[in-house]
Image: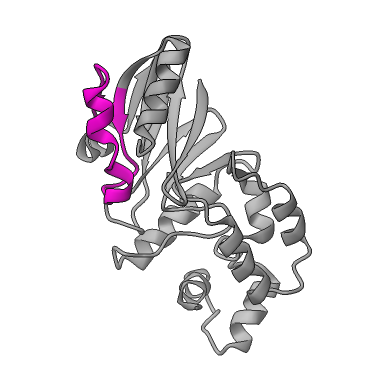
Amino acid sequence: MNVKQFRYSPDNLSYLIFGKDLAVAIDGGAAEAILAFIADKGLNLKYVTNTHAHADHTVGNQRLLDGSGAVFIDNNTLRKNRFFELEGARIVVLHTPGHTLDSVTFHLDNTLITGDTLFNGTVGNCFSGDLQGFYRSIKMLMAFPGETVIYAGHDYVSESMAFARAFEPGNRHIDAFLENYDPTHVQSTLHEEFKVNPYLRFNDENIGSILRARGLPVASEYERWASMMSVE
């Protein structure tokens, strides 16, 4: 399977997963660009779906459905079935609540399409209010191999690295992360995230020291996560 990224609005990112003949659009706000790509490659759009139901992610759904013979897969079906297939390849659906209660992540090959759960360099806001659920979702994603590629729902790299540098000014990996940043193809590996993303590094000794110096709880792993999420 192949993954193609499309940018729309200031920082939203759409994805097309495609094989030889068929494709699925995820968070297809870049509907016109996706339809043009499909036409150029001679592909058939089989499914349209989303990582979660926020309007900036669902805005392209109807245009994609009107411009193709695609079928919409709703969030309840995604979470119930836990996978779907495209040209014999299984695309696994992981329920990753936290940003929203309905948030899901798509896993195929060595790739995670994480929506607004995990960004390149940061994590999403916990709009659901379920901070423990968000913690479990992040722990689930952290368990994937280090070479796993993260494709997120927004490009927040510049902002997230500015925060990371201010929070942990001695982190020498931030410069390298920014040097590898390509706004035309936004991605990172989990291995890279573990070096720079403070929201994945809550068990790192240096992060713990910074949180402790701020008077925040660090006694347990969850306390360190919750403390990190409270930092502004």
Q: Is residue 44 left or right of residue 16?
A: left
Q: In this view of the protein, which residue sits in the foreground, 211 or 74?
A: 74
Region rendered in magenta = 47-72
Q: In which quarter of the image is residue 213?
A: bottom right
Q: In this view of the protein, which residue sits in the foreground, 119 or 194?
A: 119
| Residue 61 sits inside the magenta stretch | yes
Q: In this view of the protein, which residue sits in the foreground, 98 or 184?
A: 184
Q: Which residue is drawn at 66% across and 67% down?
A: 204
| Residue 221 sits inside the magenta stretch | no
The x, y position of residue 19, in whole percent, is 47, 15
Q: Which residue is drawn at 29% across and 37% down?
A: 60
The x, y position of residue 49, in whole percent, is 30, 34
Q: In this view, does 222 lie to the left or right of 169?
A: left
Q: Quadrant of residue 134?
A: bottom left
- Whether 55 is drawn above or below 215: the answer is above
Q: Which residue is drawn at 35% across and 39% down?
A: 29
The x, y position of residue 31, in whole percent, is 35, 32
- Whether 58 is drawn above or below 109: the answer is below
Q: Residue at x 54, y 51 (%)?
A: 142
Q: In this view of the protein, which residue sits in the foreground, 92 or 176?
A: 176
